[in-house]
Image: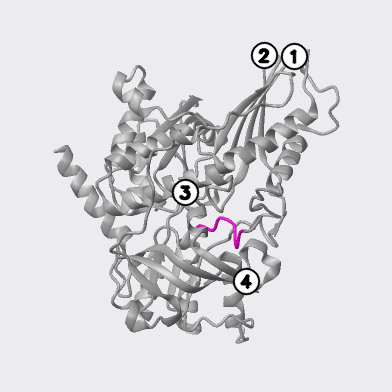
Amino acid sequence: MTPIRQEDLIGSVADALQFISYYHPLDYIRALGEAHAREESPAARDAMAQILYNSRLCAEGHRPICQDTGMVVAFLEVGMEVSWADATLSLQAMVDEGVRRAYNHPDNRLRASMVAPPYGERRNTRDNTPAVVHVSLVPGDKVHVKLAAKGGGSENKSKFTILNPSDSLVDWVVKTVPLMGAGWCPPGMLGIGIGGSAEKAMLLAKEALMEEIDIHELKARGPRTALEELRLELYDQVNALGIGAQGLGGLTTVLDVKIKDFPTHAASLPVAMIPNCAATRHVEFTLDGSGPAELTPPRLEDWPDVVWQADDKALRVNLDEMTRETIAQWQPGDRLLLTGKLLTGRDAAHKRLTDLLTRGEALPEGVDLTNRFIYYVGPVDPVRDEVVGPAGPTTATRMDKFTEQMLAETGLIGMVGKAERGPVAIEAIKKHGAVYLMAVGGAAYLVAKAIKGSRLVAFEDLGMEAIREFDVVDMPVTVAVDSRGGSVHQTGPAEWRVKIGAMKA
């Protein structure tokens, strides 16, 4: 029997979660660097440059790649010859203690996003526990751990269906990916689980995302199995959709497609699909009784030589002098650099604000939205001399249901977030002559460097969801929906789908 110390598992989980908060897997960086070099869409290429440059800054500064530092998912394979001689905690509790230490690390505090209960009060647990833990007993005398920190934007785009056995899985995937929008921050990976039962297919899809990106090696040598043929077909067909980086239109939507399967009932074909975003974060380690896991940091020279700089053609905008006449001149796809005061607020803050408006009550002191812009963000807490921690955008569609009331009753004229807006929000933007600007998801540390000041304005009890006022200088954004309702997330992919089709022809 191999004795594994409780502290070795706890400490290894804590170290690993810190490690993946600021180090992308190198296979992802290499694949994204190659995609950036191939990309022909200027907007998508710029978005990928921001993600790559952000990744290097995080590796150098040991700060989170994304402000959403994720829900922890752990797969534990425990050897049946392992003993836990000094254990006083369950495996779940050991992993949770590792999460607690990692997310409260004083030098790199991570954002706590877990809420309990999930329906009702939804109070933040303050330490990002509990983790989602899956345990399997296997032959052997070691403990193998796969850890991921899964962001909400990509997790929310998970899809599941049960097809008829004669149905086309490829057709379902190609039809479903566009319905996911861009809130999962492409380019990333698709994990697909086929077979088993409903819950088994979802687990297969999640575990598939832990695998290394190797699609280009597979293309070079050719498929050897039916699953490898399926991977290549899905990779080509999904990229042919032209969705591109951040949904702006381009050649690369996915960097790889991973598939795991399991036998299933003769009457069923369960299929699950889960995306990984631009903040792909996962790592594996093995405990053999000799002590905690040792993780080898990547070398900075392994990053591609990509340095993002603001486009010389970008329009510099003073947020403190905004009018509807000014924003009416902007076109979808225009690149802006924002300077001035920018209020923040996301799901919980919007709910409180609209509840106050509905009751006819005044908004909190300091929340004057007249001719103002609001940024959908929940930043990481600052450390050392930071004004604010990584502060990238959250998925804007979650605020769609609040948009009409906010624009109609507060004087708000602009919003900044991630990915596309839905039809309800676009109609409200058009009706009120407002605009929606898009920041790049997966470039949170880069965005934070544009924030020169931050103060709490309202709803302190909401933690990272409180309303703040940022002082920003040259914060990079793209006009995603203009005041006439034109959306770059509709025109961009449509344009590139045609271009890719012509290339293939």
Q: Residues within 10 Å of mark 2 (few under 14, many from 20)?
A: few
Residue drawn 75% across the image and 28% down it: 8
Three-letter code for the amino acid on which mark 3 is drawn:
Asn
> Which mark is first along the chain, 2 or 1?
1
Q: Secondary structure at mark 3?
A: helix
Screen quadrant of the C terminus: top left
- How many numbered discs? 4
In this orientation, which residue lies closer to the viewer: 121 or 216?
216
- Spatial CA distance of label 3 from label 2 is 41 Å
Could you tell me how far apart the alpha carbons at marks 2 and 4 are, in whole angstroms?
55 Å
Find the magenta span and give its range.
386-393
Give the mark, 2 or 4, whose residue is nearer the N terminus. Answer: 2
Name the residue type under label 4: Arg
Horizontal side of 238 relative to 114 (left or right) equals left
Q: CA distance from mark 1 to mark 2?
A: 7 Å
Distance between mark 4 and mark 3 Cα atoms: 24 Å
Q: Are marks 1 and 2 in contact (CB under 8 Å)?
A: yes
Q: What SS does tag 1 mark?
A: loop
Give the mark, 4 or 3, whose residue is nearer the N terminus.
3
Which amino acid does the dot numbered 2 rest on?
Answer: Pro
Question: Where is residue 444 drawn, in percent x and y?
Answer: 51, 54
Please name the residue that numbered disc 3 is placed on.
54
Tell me which amino acid carries mark 1: Glu
Foreground mark, 3 or 2, reads 3
User: Callout 3: few (<14), some (14-19), or many (20+) C-alpha neighbours within 10 Å?
Assistant: many
Q: Which mark is residue 81?
A: 1
Q: Earlier in the sequence, mark 3 or mark 1?
A: 3
Does residue 400 lie above or below 60 as drawn?
A: below
